[in-house]
């Protein structure tokens, strides 16, 4: 792990078992809370979800706010990593 | 209804209102509405969905404004590039109307006073035409959907290279807009035309020079700095009896071994040259350095001509001059001596008739008479010589050389019969020669007599006559001891003889040379060595076509 990675704070948001659009509202609330730090690249929001629609609605909204989004499939759930300027 | 139930009813209405508004906002965000089972009223109120979405909208709006600002800057930058670029750019729609054009395009192609070109037809605005031409690149791009290049278009007196690129398409994939880029290539075109003109000029000059070199009567060789022949003209090939292709690449030191190529300049240098399968020739040669445009030495130019015949003519001329001078002198001396010698001979003979002479006196008088007679013969020879040394005294007529030779040989029958000398004649049928028969007979006599004296007691004399280009060739060959190289150049000089003192006058061959010269011919030694000598006489003849 590089020194740059170590300097980035990871905020984990576990919404496994929840479905959209409740998931979207929960994630948006977290983004609003940490938005400046997420845009500056000082923090990243790691969302754990098992609801497929969330992997569509969350990235679409986050990107409209100028944030970078990456979606990964991890075994039975998804990781959505939000952070940095798009 | 109690106050409590009224408040509860208000709460439910409030939550319902929140849920409806939240669903409206979620719809704007492109997602489905909330279901009560996934978020109960309490969790909904705690999540503050309207506040959350409103705040997110604020962030989206902020990002949108940021992006708009960036786009505006990019647009301004693009406009600046569009206007500042060195090429003219137009955006043209499928009706050939100009949607936009930059400043360069305007300055290059738009007539002053027509600055506002938006919406006007490009063929009218740029080309002053009523319709697009067949080779219009925009027309091609609209028709094919492919980029097109017109390498050279002339507009308003300038040369352009025009490139069109499809820019937008409709739902049927048909091109609706093209970008046309016009590059002013006038300077490049002018430079190309100037270069072409210059190249044609140089090619013409080169052709002229090549023609001049080929038409030169002098041979010309160009050699590089390593002494290799890089160019040779036709006269050089003819003179050196080699093909031009044979000479190219050959070392000049190999071709002309006697040439000192270390010297930069040579003027009128005589150089012997032996062509393949031909006798040695003399070349008169000049050599100059060959310089490039920066005056650097890159080789040499050698010009030359075959001076063999010229040198023979010069020798002949000098000999004639000498003969003429000696002839005049001889005539004067002979005339002055003839009278006193006649007196000496006459008185000697008169005294011999006296009877009272002693035997010794008689013998002495006989010697005086004999020597005076011999002196008289010498004077007669001198007079003959002087007569032939005067060119005006010769009368040329058409005569048969073979008959003249036969007539001369008749006179030698007695002399030949005394010795064991075989005389062979090989006389071809030849045209008549223009000559003085008496003089030519004298030449044949002198040459055969000379051969007889050279052979001595036993040998062979061959007389051959042939018709060749330029005249009749008469050869008199003997099997005598030959003529030494060191005296060859003097053999035709008057009074030059190899015979012992008192036995020859040294005028025989001089007289021959004089007569032949009078007859417009030439005489020379063709071969001389230990196996004998061959004299060659060339006489002009009357050719079949001559009047």
Image (cartoon, coloured by chain):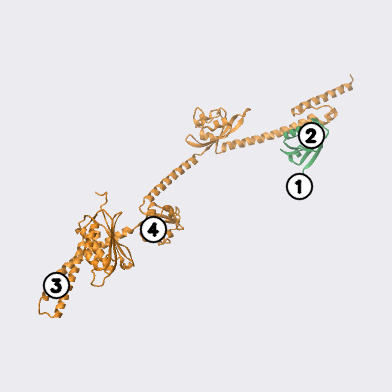
Residue B255 circle label: none
Q: Is residue B389 visible?
A: no
Residue that carries the numbered disc 1 in the rendered image: A3
Q: Nearer the viewer, residue B38 or B312?
A: B312
Of all chains in the rendering, the one displayed in orange is B
**Mark 4 or mark 3, which has the lower sequence index?**
4
Tell how many labels. Answer: 4
- Name the chain under label 4: B
Q: In front: B419, or B515?
A: B419
Chain coloured green in the rendered structure: A
Please give the name of the residue rendered at 59% of the width and 37% of the height, measured from the top-left corner.
B80
Q: Position of residue B99 (x, y in %)?
A: 57, 30
Q: Which mark is residue B345?
A: 3
Residue at which label 4 appears: B277
Secondary structure beneath label 2: helix
Q: Which mark is residue A27?
A: 2
Marks 4 and 1 in Cβ contact (< 8 Å): no
Q: Is residue B310 visible?
A: yes
Label 1 marks a residue whose chain is: A
Discs 3/1, front: 3
């Amino acid at each position: 792990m590089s020194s740059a990675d170590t300097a980035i704070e990871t905020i984990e948001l576990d919404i496994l078992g929840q479905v959209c659009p409740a998931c979207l509202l929960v994630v948006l609330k977290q983004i609003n809370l940490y938005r400046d730090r997420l845009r500056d690249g000082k923090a990243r929001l790691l969302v754990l979800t098992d609801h497929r629609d969330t992997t569509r609605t969350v990235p679409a909204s986050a990107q409209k706010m100028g944030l970078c989004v990456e979606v990964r499939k991890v075994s039975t759930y998804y990781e959505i990593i939000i952070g940095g300027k798009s | 209804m109690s106050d409590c139930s009224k408040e509860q009813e208000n709460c439910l209405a409030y939550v319902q209102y929140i849920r409806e508004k939240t669903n409206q906002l979620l719809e704007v965000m492109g997602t489905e509405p909330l279901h009560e089972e996934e978020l109960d009223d309490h969790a909904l109120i705690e999540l503050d969905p309207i506040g959350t979405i409103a705040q997110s909208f604020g962030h989206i709006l902020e990002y949108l404004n940021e992006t708009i600002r960036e786009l505006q800057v990019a647009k301004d930058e693009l406009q600046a590039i569009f206007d500042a670029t060195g090429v003219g750019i137009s955006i043209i729609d499928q009706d050939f109307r100009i949607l936009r054009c930059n400043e360069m395009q305007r300055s290059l192609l738009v007539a002053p006073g027509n600055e506002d070109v938006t919406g006007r037809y490009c063929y009218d605005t740029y080309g002053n035409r009523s319709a697009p031409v067949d080779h219009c690149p925009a027309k091609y791009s609209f028709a094919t959907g492919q980029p097109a290049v017109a390498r050279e278009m002339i507009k308003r007196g300038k040369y352009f290279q025009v490139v069109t690129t499809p820019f937008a398409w409709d739902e049927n994939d048909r091109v609706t807009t093209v970008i046309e880029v016009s590059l002013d290539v006038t300077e490049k075109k002018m430079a190309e035309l100037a270069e072409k003109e210059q190249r044609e000029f140089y090619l013409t000059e080169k052709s002229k020079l090549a023609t001049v070199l080929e038409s030169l009567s002098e041979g010309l060789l160009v050699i590089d700095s390593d002494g290799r022949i890089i160019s040779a003209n036709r006269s050089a090939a003819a003179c050196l009896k080699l093909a031009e292709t044979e000479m190219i690449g050959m070392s000049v030191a190999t071709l002309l071994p006697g040439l000192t190529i270390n010297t930069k300049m040579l003027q009128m240098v005589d150089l012997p040259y032996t062509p393949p399968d031909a006798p040695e020739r003399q070349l008169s040669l000049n050599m100059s350095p060959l310089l490039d445009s920066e005056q650097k030495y890159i080789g040499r130019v050698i010009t030359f001509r075959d001076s063999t015949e010229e040198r023979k003519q010069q020798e002949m001329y000098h000999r004639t001059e000498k003969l003429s001078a000696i002839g005049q002198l001889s005539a004067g001396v002979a005339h002055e001596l003839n009278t006193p010698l006649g007196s000496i001979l006459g008185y000697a003979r008169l005294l011999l008739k006296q009877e009272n002479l002693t035997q010794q006196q008689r013998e002495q008088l006989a010697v005086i008479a004999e020597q005076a007679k011999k002196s008289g013969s010498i004077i007669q020879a001198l007079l003959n010589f002087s007569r032939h040394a005067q060119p005006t005294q010769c009368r040329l007529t058409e005569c048969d050389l073979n008959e003249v030779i036969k007539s001369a040989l008749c006179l030698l029958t007695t002399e030949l019969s005394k010795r064991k000398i075989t005389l062979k004649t090989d006389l071809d049928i030849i045209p008549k020669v223009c000559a003085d028969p008496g003089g030519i007979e004298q030449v044949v006599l002198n040459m055969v007599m000379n051969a007889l004296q050279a052979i001595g007691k036993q040998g062979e004399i061959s007389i051959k006559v042939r018709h060749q280009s330029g005249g009749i060739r008469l050869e008199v060959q003997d099997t005598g001891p030959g003529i030494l190289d060191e005296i060859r150049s003097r053999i035709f000089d008057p009074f030059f003889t190899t015979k012992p003192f008192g036995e020859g006058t040294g005028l025989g061959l001089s007289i021959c040379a004089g007569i032949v010269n009078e007859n417009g011919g030439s005489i020379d030694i063709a071969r001389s060595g230990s196996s004998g000598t061959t004299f060659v006489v060339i006489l002009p003849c009357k050719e079949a076509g001559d009047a």
